[in-house]
Image (cartoon, helix red, strand yellow):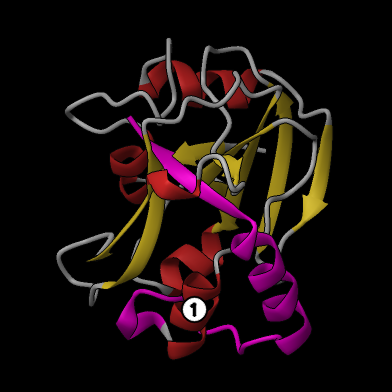
Amino acid sequence: MSIFLTPFARARLFPRQPRGNTIQDCTPDEFERYLNEHAPLKVLDGYAPFCKLHVHRNWTATRCLTVPVTDANRHRLRSAYEARTKQELPVLVRWFEGVEPPVADYLVVILYSRGQLAAEGSPIEADWGVVGCLYTALPEEIPMAPVTMMRNALGVEEGGSGVPLDREAYRRSVEFWENNANWRP
């Protein structure tokens, strides 16, 4: 099985201007090579048949992606309308500023099949393409953000995957994201 770091994931996980809340101590090429040379601890099913999650023990200094919201840190939450790419419409996002989470124990790599990436207009030669990565304390998936689920349901033309909204998964996502938020340095 071959894995390719897609341009979409490369820009988000390894931005030109490095940030403390992205993958640390590793270049994009080293990351891709590691995924191709090391078997995951486990493989989880993603939100659709074309999506798999490979769980790896964190081999970097990358910090957890999310922080629990508490009364002590709620005042550090910020929000804005942002788009992930120039083609996508901005959506409301929120994050912490001034909060530093612990180093993640696991990297949960989100993979899409070659067929799905071709359907989305991003063909690859490898079997699987990296579209994202979760940095976690536990070897499991963080629920997809509600807005990402909605974007996916809107279809490929709006930056999604075309997978219909799963109401129960959406409710679980809302429960998680009401109590947790991403962070920015």
> Going by the image, does 57 lie left or right of 153?
right
> Going by the image, does 29 lie left or right of 64?
left
Q: Quadrant of the C terminus?
A: top left
Residue 105 occupies quadrant:
top right
As drawn, the residue found furthest toward the right would be 42
Residue located at (32% from left, 82% from top): 158
Magenta stretch: residue 13 in it?
no
Q: Position of residue 72 (x, y in %)?
A: 56, 40
Query: Between 87 and 111, which is closer to the camera in this rendering?
Result: 87
Residue located at (24% from left, 73% from top): 90
Q: Secondary structure at mark 1?
A: helix
Residue located at (48% from left, 46% from top): 182
Q: Is residue 47 visible?
A: no
- Residue wearing tag 1: 152
Q: Position of residue 125 (x, y in %)?
A: 45, 48
Q: Quadrant of the N terminus?
A: top right
Q: Is residue 138 above or below residue 82?
A: above
As drawn, the residue found furthest toward the front would be 71
Query: Between 84 and 115, which is closer to the camera in this rendering?
Result: 84
Magenta stretch bounds: 156-185
Query: Between 163 and 184, which is closer to the camera in this rendering?
Result: 184
Residue located at (55% from left, 76% from top): 149
Q: Residues within 10 Å of mark 1 (few under 14, many from 20)?
A: some
Q: Position of residue 150 (x, y in %)?
A: 49, 82
Q: Amino acid at mark 1?
A: Asn
Q: Is residue 47 above or below residue 13?
A: below
> Going by the image, does 30 lie left or right of 55?
left
Magenta stretch: residue 160 in it?
yes
Q: Position of residue 168 (x, y in %)?
A: 78, 83
